[in-house]
Amino acid sequence: MFHRHARAPLRTACFLGLLSLTLIANSCSHTKASPPPISMDVVMKTIRDYGLGHPGLLSPGSSAEPDEADNLYRVHISNLLVQEDFAQLEKIAQQNRVEKGRLIGGYWKNYEFFFATGYPFSDGAPKDSDYRLQIDMLKKWIAAYPESAAARISLADLYANYASFGRGPGFADSVTNAQWRLFRRATPTSLGSTAPRT
């Protein structure tokens, strides 16, 4: 006849035995053979073969030598917008997309085009009225050319710049309620909207 205390070591031994078998069984089912190492020559050959027939991601741009300075180009584009010469702006935007031209100093013409149309042209620091005037001009461009991607990109860029102007450069806790209202007013209610919130 076994004592009650005599059974405890037997139960513990059985439990540990079952636990060991369970761990061994689980560890056997999860082992994988490591793949053989791949030589660097094979990797490089695969990369070169993959690249054959694929267009490059970066465009080398136009082979023409740049002949315009970025600041003069921006002034020219801004003047076309002020004069509401939307046909010429459309032509230049299309030309920039196709030719991928650069300016003296290496800036992309396309980048400077949208800088000029998406930021108000002013003698000093732009004011709220400068942004509103530029928004009105861009809305006229969209009305004249409803399918224009360039006009909509310019307006979206201007709204982002206007919102940043309204909010100011400070940390969030230093932004006044009036600045937050201007920030919200400058942020369109939807991607398709051409009017700021009121």
Image (tube, helix red, strand yellow):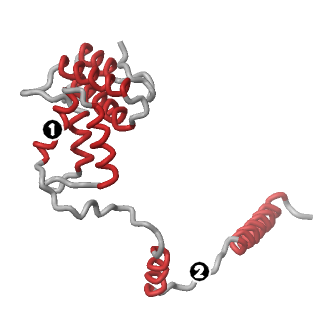
Q: Is residue 174 left or right of residue 94?
A: left
Secondary element type, mark 2: loop
Q: Nearest the camera: 167 or 197? A: 197
Q: Nearest the camera: 115 or 14? A: 115
Query: Residue 123: x and y, percent?
Result: 7, 27
The type of residue carrying mark 2 is: Ser
Q: CA distance from mark 2 to mark 1?
A: 63 Å
Residue 170 visible in the displayed image: no
Question: Dot 2 corresponds to which residue?
Answer: 34
Q: Is residue 40 above or below residue 157?
A: below
Figure label count: 2
Question: Dot 1 corresponds to which residue?
Answer: 76
Q: Nearest the camera: 193 or 10? A: 193
Query: Looking at the image, is mark 2 or mark 1 earlier in the sequence?
Result: 2
Q: Quadrant of the N terminus?
A: bottom right
Question: Which numbered disc covers residue 170?
Answer: none
Packing grade of label 2 (10 A; few <14, some 14-19, many >=20) is few
Q: Quadrant of the C terminus?
A: top left
Q: Nearest the camera: 198 or 87? A: 87
Q: Residue at x 11, y 43 (%)?
A: 71
Secondary element type, mark 1: helix
Q: Is residue 38 above or below residue 81?
A: below
* Quarter assignment of residue 128: top left
